[in-house]
């Protein structure tokens, strides 16, 4: 691995990760580097790392006999003064796939700007190349300019982004009118509405995103699970979820899902708008979703929305949503 050898001549701390030896240090580093970024799933993953670092027999069994379930343990670390100060995780997106994922690129604060992140990336890319990987993707915060510049220098290109927004309390809002050419109705729990919702999502999702994450028809089917969920929510005194469509004649041009929170969870909004109708449907739909949730106004509302639809993100912000973070997916062809 010529690139790794070159990096070692400059900064000798680079080596492959040894889970039996490094896991606790990697967990400490990730907690330090991403302290303000870890969501609930990230916190759970960090706890799992710490749990494994203490249960060496379980960790040994995973590494030795069950490598398909230990992908998050593969990659490289940078060690200085007997301390893990840099880490990168490199693994296939699925067993046997030629698509690879780089994650957890982390460097301790006092060791940054020394070329450690670049050396870790070189090592990760060299590993993908040796394993005949076809492409590699990674995720980075939109406001992490230094990291984005490094990835761009390594020939990564932006392919998608997701904005995470939050509203701490549902406000009282006025209804914004819908264009007269369309009508709003509840989604039916049948195959026709599922096909139309899937067609709308296809039209609204850029091709480059679909190449990485193909849309599944099943994602747009409503059935017994949703019906039973609403019965349960109403039984415990909560708010039922709502699924709406905006139609222009027989064509879906907008889709809005309200996932009402239960047991302390936030409410969630999901919004899809046909590209030809963007800028005209977002405020009418968001205002109606907020009005629907007004009885549960004390609960927060969370939104995860693609950055290729800025009209919706701007509309959410006009209603008081705050942007918590925006994450960008970047890809490099090998």
Image (cartoon, grey):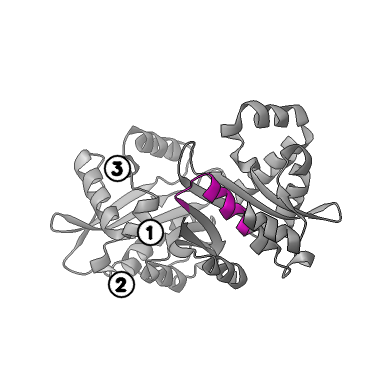
Front tag of 3 and 2:
3
Residue appearing at x 78%, y 35% in the figure = 54
Count of picture labels: 3
Front tag of 2 and 1:
2
| Residue pointed to by mark 2 | 279
Q: Which residues are drawn in magenta?
A: 121-135
Residue appearing at x 33%, y 33% in the figure = 224
Whether residue 275 is visible to the viewer of this picture, yes or no, is yes
Residue 134: percent from the left, percent from the top? 44, 50
CA gap, disc 1 and disc 3:
24 Å
Whether residue 33 is visible to the viewer of this picture, yes or no, is no
Residue 288: percent from the left, percent from the top? 35, 61
Residue 109: percent from the left, percent from the top? 76, 65
| Residue pointed to by mark 1 | 289
CA gap, disc 2 and disc 1:
17 Å
Query: How dense is the environment of label 3, judged by Cα within 10 Å: few (below 14), some, or many (20 and up)?
Result: few
**Is residue 123 a member of the stretch shown in magenta?**
yes
| Residue pointed to by mark 3 | 217
CA gap, disc 3 and disc 2:
26 Å
């Amino acid at each position: 691995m010529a690139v790794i050898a070159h990096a070692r001549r400059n900064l000798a701390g680079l080596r492959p990760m040894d889970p039996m030896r490094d896991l606790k240090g990697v967990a400490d580093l990730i907690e330090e580097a991403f302290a303000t970024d870890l969501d609930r799933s990230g916190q759970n993953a960090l706890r799992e790392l710490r749990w494994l670092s203490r249960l060496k027999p379980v960790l040994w069994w995973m590494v030795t006999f069950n490598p398909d379930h230990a992908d998050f343990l593969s990659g490289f670390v940078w060690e200085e003064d007997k301390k893990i100060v840099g880490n990168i995780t490199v693994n296939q997106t699925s067993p046997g796939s030629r698509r690879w994922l780089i994650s957890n690129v982390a460097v301790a604060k006092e060791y940054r700007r020394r070329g450690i992140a670049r050396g870790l990336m070189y090592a990760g890319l060299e590993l993908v190349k040796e394993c005949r990987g076809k492409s590699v993707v990674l995720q980075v915060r939109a406001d992490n300019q230094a990291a984005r510049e490094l990835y761009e220098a390594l020939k990564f290109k932006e392919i998608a982004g997701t904005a995470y927004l939050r509203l701490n309390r549902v406000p009282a809002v006025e209804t914004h009118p819908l264009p007269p050419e369309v009508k709003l109705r509840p989604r039916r729990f049948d195959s026709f509405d599922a096909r139309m919702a899937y067609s709308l999502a296809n039209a609204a999702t850029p091709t480059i995103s679909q190449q990485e994450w193909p849309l599944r028809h099943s994602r747009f089917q409503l059935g017994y699970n949703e019906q039973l969920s609403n019965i349960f929510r109403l039984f415990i005194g909560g708010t039922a979820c709502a699924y709406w469509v905006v139609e222009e004649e027989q064509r879906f041009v907008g889709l809005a899902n309200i996932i009402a929170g239960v047991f302390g969870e936030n409410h969630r909004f999901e919004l899809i708008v046909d590209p030809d109708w963007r800028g005209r449907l977002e405020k009418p739909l968001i205002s109606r979703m907020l009005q629907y949730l007004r009885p549960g106004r004390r609960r927060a509302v969370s939104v995860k929305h693609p950055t290729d639809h800025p009209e919706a993100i701007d509309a959410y912000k006009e209603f008081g949503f705050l942007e918590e973070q925006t994450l960008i997916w970047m890809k490099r062809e090998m």
